[in-house]
Image (cartoon, rainbow, N blue to C red):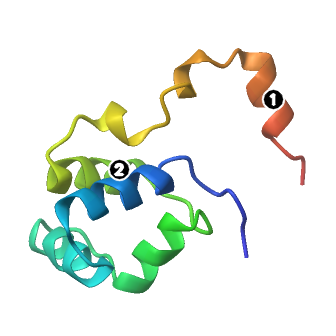
Amino acid sequence: MLKNANVVGQNVVKFRHQAGWTQEVLAGKMQLLGCYITRDIIAQIETRRSTVNDERVMFFARVFGVEIGRLFPQNFGNKSPCDCRKQISVI
């Protein structure tokens, strides 16, 4: 199982709680928009054990009514390329 597999999970939790939704409700709303996702997948994303592709990021932004950039941590764009390379592991 992956750890720290995405950077948006914490904000997905934040926006879901602000909306007063359960993971099940969020999954249903995203499914109505055309996104295949389940409560289990949302749980994996929120705990950062699952990656999130760009399409799902767009669906999260739509369902929460926020700009895509708000799903990412505030300091996400401030890292230099060298900082990012340190976080990449070689297989």
User: Is 14 placed left or right of 79 in the picture?
Assistant: left
Which labelled disc corresponds to residue 40?
none
Label 1 vs 2, first from the N-terminus: 2
Residue at image location 24% in from the left, 47% down from the top? 61
What's the residue type where badge 1 is placed?
Answer: Arg
Q: Work out whether 50 lies above or below 71.
A: below
**31 or 72: nearer the viewer:** 72
Could you tell me residue 51's position as x and y percent? 56, 60
Query: Extreme left residue here?
Result: 32
Instruction: Name the residue: 48% across, 28% down.
Output: 74
Mark 2 crowdedness (10 Å alpha carbons): few <14, some 14-19, many ≥20: some
Left or right of 91? Residue 49 is: left
For residue 79, which quarter of the picture? top right
Residue neighbourhood size for the residue with mark 1, other residues' Cα within 10 Å, grouped as few (<14), some (14–19), many (≥20): few
Residue drawn at point x = 39 percent, y = 47 percent: 54
- Report how many numbered discs are placed on residues in the image: 2
Residue under the image location 29 percent in, 54 percent down: 15
Asked which secondary structure carries label 1, the reply is helix
Residue 65 at x, y percent in the picture:
14, 46
C-alpha separation, residue under disc 1 versus residue under disc 2: 23 Å
Residue 27, x across and y down, in percent: 25, 77
Return the mark for residue 85: 1
Circle 2 SS class: helix
Q: Quadrant of the N terminus?
A: bottom right
Residue where numbered disc 2 is placed: 57
| 37 with respect to 79 (left or right) | left
Q: Amino acid at mark 2?
A: Val
